[in-house]
């Protein structure tokens, strides 16, 4: 039994699973409808301060939901950090939400510090939008400059892939032309 469990874990975390080709086409067919995100809600930063998400309204925003206790989230984080450090655009932001309990802020800070993660991390506040409430993590959403959710993904994603960055640039450029 233990051997079977070990083999399953190895298969799950093997290079083939993590490096499998990922369809990086940004599309909405995974969404129930043309969901939009109302930026009129507050989040809690790592110092405990409440911040309005309106600060990022009008930008393309990649939202990622994760937790320190989530193995697949930990696998995904280096890719998110690489995107954060390599893809700079004044109209693009990465915002992550730790789904750890707010009283575990020191655990979250420690994890981020040890891993050298520098992207924006917040905790959901009581008015967290339903559209971002998910059944499993990691989960990610790409919100366009009008607040429309144009892509979502559940599970480990390689954000640092050139195909994802290319599609992101295309989306941003197509909105500039409108």
Image: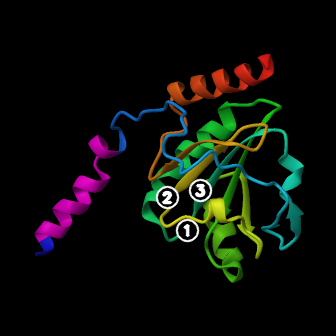
Distance Cα–Cα, label 3 vs label 2: 10 Å
Q: What stretch of residues is rendered in magenta?
A: 3-17
- Is 63 positioned to the left or the right of 92 in the image? left
Is 10 contained in the magenta span? yes
Q: Tell me where residue 52 appears, x and y as whole percent.
A: 88, 60
- Is 50 positioned to the left or the right of 175 in the image? right
Q: Nearer the viewer, residue 88 or 21?
A: 21
Q: Nearer the viewer, mark 3 or mark 2?
A: 2
User: Mark 2 = which residue?
Assistant: 74
Q: Residue at horizontal 43%, vertical 63%?
A: 71
Q: Residue at horizontal 58%, vertical 48%?
A: 33
Is 57 contained in the magenta span? no
Q: Nearer the viewer, mark 3 or mark 1?
A: 1
- Is 30 positioned to the left or the right of 117 in the image? left
Q: Main secondary structure of the magenta part?
A: helix
Residue 68, numbered circle? 1
């Amino acid at each position: 039994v233990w051997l079977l469990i070990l083999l399953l874990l190895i298969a799950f975390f093997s290079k083939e699973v993590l490096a499998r080709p990922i369809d990086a086409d940004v599309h909405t067919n995974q969404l129930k409808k043309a969901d939009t995100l109302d930026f009129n809600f507050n989040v809690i930063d790592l110092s405990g301060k409440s911040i309005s998400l309106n600060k990022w309204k009008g930008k393309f925003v990649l939202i990622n939901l994760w937790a320190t206790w989530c193995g697949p989230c930990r696998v995904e984080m280096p890719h998110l950090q690489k995107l954060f450090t390599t893809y700079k655009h004044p109209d693009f932001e990465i915002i992550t939400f730790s789904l750890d309990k707010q009283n575990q802020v020191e655990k979250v800070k420690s994890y981020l510090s040890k891993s050298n993660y520098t992207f924006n991390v917040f905790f959901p506040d009581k008015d967290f939008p339903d559209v971002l409430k998910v059944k499993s993590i990691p989960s990610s959403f790409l919100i366009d400059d009008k607040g429309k959710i144009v892509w979502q993904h559940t599970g480990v994603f390689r954000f640092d892939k050139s195909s994802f960055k290319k599609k992101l640039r295309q989306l941003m450029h197509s909105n500039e032309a409108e």
